[in-house]
Every structure is written in C-alpha cells, then in structure tokens.
Amino acid sequence: MFAACADPKAIEGLTWALCYLTSGKHLDFYWSFLVVLALLAITAPAALAFGFGGATAARSGFLPARWLGNVYIAMVRGVPDIIFFLFFVIALDQAIEWTKHQIVCPDWTEPVRQGLEFRVCPDAKVPHSSSAAIWHQAYGFFVAAMTFAIVFGAFVANVLYGAMQAVPRAELETGEAYGMSSAQVFRRILVPQMWVYALPGLSNLWMILIKATPLLFLLGIRDVVFYARELGSTKTQAFDYPHGDWRLYYFLGLLVFYLALTRLSEIVLNRLSSRISRGQATAAGDALRKAGA
Amino acid sequence: MRKLLMAAALAMTAGTALAQDTVRLGTEGAYPPFNFINDAGDVAGFEREVGDELCKRAGLTCEWVTNEWDSIIPNLQSGNYDVIIAGMTITDEREEVIDFSQNYYPPAASAYAAASADADFRTGIVSAQVSTLQATHVAESGATLLEFATPEETISAVNNGEAVAVFAEKDYLRPFVAESGGALMFVGDDITIGGGVGLGFRSSDTDLRAKFDAGITAMKADGTLNALIEKYFGPEGLKF
C-alpha cells in the first residue's frame, strides 16, 4: 500500500507494523466487519418479515395457512441451528440450480444426480462459472442471509404470535364496536399495540443473531472469524510478514468488536423500549406516566 | 410465459457460447508451500504456479477458489469448482469417489515433529489434519489421534502442549521446524504414504482431466515442473 512496504523483510518496528496492518489481507479483514454488519442489516428485517408472515399464518382463520405457519415454526425451531445451516444451504443452492436447469436445458438427457455428483448443465450453474469471483461471493452471501432469515424468522414468528395474543381483547373489541372490519382491527390496533409485548423477545433474538454471525464462517463466507484465524496463524518465511501464533490477539479484537456491538444494541433497545411503552397499559407504561407527572 | 422463458433461456445460452467457459480451481489456501493465501490476499504457492501454467498450456481460463479442506471433495461433486488442486495425495479410497490426474509431485515422506527428542509419538497424543492420510496413519498406529481442521493448528497443538507430536507431510513441516529456533524437531523415521499429489476431478469430467493430464506430462518432460519444485521446496524437494 505504501512505498515503504515494497520490501517487507527489510523493514522493522513501527514501519513494519504499519505495513503489516495495511497488507491486502488485512484490508480484506477490515472489509469483513462490514460483511457481518451487512448480514445483520439484511437478516434482521428479512427475519422480521418471515416472522410476521409465520405468526399471521399461524393465527389465521384459514386452516391450511394455519398448518403452514405452525409447521414452519415447529420445524425450524426444532432442528439444531448448525444442522439446519449445513443442510439448508446445500439444499437451497441445489434447488435453485435444479430449477434453472429445468428451464434453461430442457433437452439435457443425462441425470442430474450421478451417484454422489450433482451435475446440472453448465448454463444452469448459479452463478455462471464464467462470472466474476465477486458474484460467487455475493451469491454465497445471499444464500447464507436467506438461511439466517428463515431460522431466525421462526423464532420471531413465535414471539410475535405470543405478542399478538397478549394484546388485551378489550382493545380489539373497542375497535370492532367502532365498526372496523377484522382486517382494520388487525392493522390499526393489533399490530401497533403488539410491539410492546414483542420487544423483550425480539431484543433477545437480536442479541442472539449478533452472536450467531460467526456461523457465516461455517457456510464458507470469509467473515471476521475466517480472517482472524487466517491472519493470526503462524506465518513462515514463505509469507511477506512472518510471525508466530497471534490468534489470541486477533480473537481478542473480535471479542471487543462483539461486545461493543451488543452494548450499543442494548442502549438502542432500551431507548426503543421506553419509547413504545409510552401511554401503554403496562407496568413500564405506568412507570413512565408516574415519572412524567 | 413459456415463450418468455424460452427467450430468456436462448439469450442466456447465446451469451455463454461467446464467453469461454471458466475452469474453477479449488484449493485449501492454508498449506504452504503447496498453497496459501499470501499477504495480498491472493492464492499463492507451488500449486498456484502449476495450476496457472497448466491452464495456459491447455488454453483455458482459470479462476481460483478456496474451500475448507474437510469439505473439499463434496463441494467438487456438487459443482462449486471443477478441479481440486490442494496438495491431495492419490489414494485408493479417494479414487473411489473422484478421479485423479497423474501426480505432479512425487510420493513424499511424512514425518513426526515434536517439542522434545524423547517425545512418545507411538502411544501419546499425536495431532494431524482431519481427513488426511496422516490422520488415518496415526489412528492405526496406536497413538491417540487429535484432529484439527487446518494444518497450522496441528503444529500449534504441539507448541501449546495439547499434543506431544504432529504427524504431517515433511515438506509442510520443514519450514516450521527450521524457523522454530529449536522448539520443534523431527522425531522417528520418515514414512512414505500414498501415490504422490494429483489433481482431483469429478468422475464424469474425463475431457477436462485429459487436458490437464497432457499438460502435466509436458511439464514433466520439459523440466518446468522440476524447476517449480526446486523454487518452492528447495533442494530437499523431490524431483521427477
């Protein structure tokens, strides 16, 4: 990066440290923090959407929708995360390629499954084998984010389901007395009122989601854990910057990063909680009222 | 709708007929000097140069992909890449699931490295990388096997006392022993296992395998392969 870094083995001290910390691999490491934040930014709303869909389906009056919602919640919550992650990512990837295969290569005669091999026609590869590496990474990231969203969506669905049931029946009845249809009651009263009951559960899930992001590493995404292990491991003279086993320091850095992230989340969630408790007929709402008086 | 899909399909096939298909080379990126990720963040090492040279000779466009060692064969079969070039030794067990090219590195010695000369590597705890010939050998030797996902961790295990010795390919261990300042040393006799290092292909990819095989034959004949072995493994590296 700097001119002084042209010959890494000849420099030492502060210059060495500066050159070391700005090597191409370190810059990739710094980017990977953004990958983690991007995963959170994409997964959280997606999981909320899955959860909202699941909860709405689970308490729907239409029987097949209720089945669908309940099966989704029970199945995903019941399977260990890691198994689900390992299975689902492969299954989703193969399902996408198989579907594309049916559309793109209708004349393909060879079987897709040949023993242990999964072989679709070359044009059905997602992403196509000639596309740039960045697309392969983006695709892997997308599949991982979807998997996270589906897993966490099931937990969110359960939390929202409980929150919807917790809204006092009297409030919904008031809406009905004003002549609102059931859809209007759902939209104008139930959904705005449920958040105060849902927030403690959702904030828990958010914290768990932050702490689950190192699972990205299991899915083959080059996240912070991958780079911390890669950079921290012993480097021989084959590398530009040889050093001993420094994994401890790199993982210490990750510890600080995750603690900062969870602490920040706590502060934001506490503010949010007091905000939506305002005017609510709950103990927290009551406390706010008394403090204000 | 069907017409639309057909049109889209045609457009896609037309586009790819022009662009040459890329061959994706899968490697571990954690096994110097065979393959590693250098400080610039790129795949480097002996296999990087061999792979690039083979692609050049066969007139193929190649792209490098890294994958965890443990899942490197399943991901070849599910089509994430087309060739395994990761210091993989040719064995009968692996031949049953994938096909190998001829070897581009001769059958090499494996060795034990330990922190002291009297380390009990015959019955003590010995570390090795998961899914390797060395791990199988340790498990059958009567020692207690301690497996790790990456080769570097197997050496760390000896350094921090988790294992009394590490069993791995000598070419991999040599720089670590040489640069340890006496903290690590080779113990016991060298053991040669396997039939050398080869490229791994899906069994159905016979054409691709033939292209790479021809390239290896040519590189052996004109001495370029031996020159690369000398460059990365030094005078101790085995030549053809």
Image: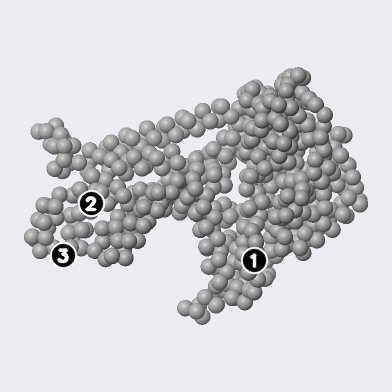
Using a 10 Å C-alpha cutoff, classify the residue at mark 2 as few (fewer than 14 neighbours), some (14 to 19) or many (20 or more): many
Where B83 falls versus B16 (above or below)? above
On-image quarter of the C terminus of chain B: top right
Q: Marks 1 and 2: in contact by CB < 8 Å? A: no
Q: Is residue B36 visible?
A: no
Looking at the rendering, which quadrant does residue A57 occupy?
Answer: bottom left
Q: How many labels does the image show?
A: 3
The reply, left or right, for residue A191 in relation to residue B23 is left
Residue in the foreground of this view, choosing between B107 and A34: B107
Task: State the residue at coordinates (47%, 42%).
Answer: A213
Q: Marks 3 and 1: in contact by CB < 8 Å? A: no
As drawn, the label of residue A164 is 2
Residue A93: image location, x then y, percent:
54, 58
Tell which circle, 2 or 3, labels the residue nearer the N-terminal end.
2
Return the residue at label 1: A122
Distance from the alpha carbon under mark 2 to that under mark 3: 17 Å
Distance from the alpha carbon under mark 1 to that under mark 3: 53 Å
Secondary-structure class at tag 1 = helix
- Establish whether labels 1 and 3 are both on one chain: yes
Residue A62: image location, x then y, percent:
26, 66
Question: What chain is tagged by disc 1?
Answer: A
Q: Marks 3 and 2: in contact by CB < 8 Å? A: no
Residue B10: image location, x then y, percent:
59, 76
Tell which circle, 1 or 3, labels the residue nearer the N-terminal end.
1
Tell which circle, 2 or 1, labels the residue nearer the N-terminal end.
1
Question: What chain is tagged by disc 2?
Answer: A
Q: What residue type is labelled 2?
A: Met
As drawn, the label of residue A181 is 3
Q: Which amino acid does label 1 sit on?
A: Pro
Task: State the residue at coordinates (63%, 45%).
Answer: B70
